[in-house]
Image (spheres, rainbow, N blue to C red):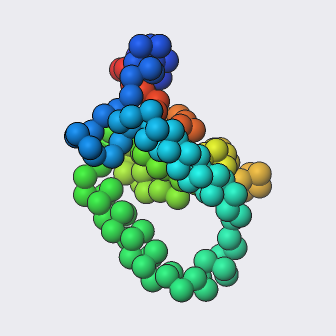
Amino acid sequence: MNKRPRDEPSSSLASAQKRQFGAGGGGYGGQQGYSEERNSARRVADHYSARSNQTLEERENSPIIHLKKLNNWIKSVLVQLYARPGDCVLDLACGKGGDLIKWDKARVGYYVGVDIAEGSIKDCMTRYNGDADQQRRKKFSFPARLICADCYEVKVIIKW
């Protein structure tokens, strides 16, 4: 029987610890810097959660559509080259789940997506769970766990 990975809550001690980078460097050093980092993270989350979904026509008319397509192609190639069937994927900043099909084609065994924006995670859940129209619904071959969190703030432990 295969056990699926699961999250375990972080201990209060681990949650209380702040990340520290080199002396005088960025990160969550002093209390003031920590507060500023949290405010910046909140602004990023709010920005992405507030963005509306674009239609296909709007996306195609984007001035950077060619750059987006190149980026998407590169990610597809990297996933196909390095992902192996049954792999467990930790996708940090997974966004709205635009790469779910890439991971499905690679036949991964389990997917964990983490993003700071609640709106993006909700869109990713909708994409993973499929379209309301049953004939257009995409069924993914892997179980997934989607987490709305700041990757620098939350400790995620995955056990087999």
Is residue 159 rendered to the left or right of residue 49?
Answer: left
Vertical comparison of 13 with 29: above or below: above
Q: Which of 120 and 106 lies nearest the eye of the viewer?
A: 120
User: Which residue is rendered at x = 35% and y = 36% of the image?
Assistant: 29
Query: Residue placed at 36% from the left, 63% from the top?
Result: 75
Where does residue 63 sit, x and y in percent of width and height? 54, 86
Q: Residue at x 46, y 38 (%)?
A: 32
Q: In this view, does 10 lie above or below 113?
A: above
Instruction: Name the spot of residue 151 as percent of width and height, x first.
Output: 44, 39
143 on left or right of 49: left
Q: In this view of the protein, which residue sits in the foreground, 68 or 107?
A: 68
- Seen at 33% across and 56% down, the residue is 79
In which quadrant of the rendered view does residue 11 lie?
Answer: top left
Give the quarter of the image for residue 118.
Answer: top right
Q: Nearer the viewer, residue 13 or 115?
A: 13
Decide if residue 94 is in sight here: yes
Instruction: For the N terminus, give its image quadrant.
Output: top left
- Quadrant in which the C terminus is drawn: top left
**Percent position of residue 95, x then y:** 54, 53
Could one spot residue 138 in this view of the protein? no
Q: In the rendered view, tell whether residue 74 sits above or below residue 134.
A: below
Q: Give the side of residue 48 with respect to residue 33, left or right.
A: right
Front residue of 119/55: it is 119
Pinpoint residue 84: horizontal percent, then vertical percent: 28, 45
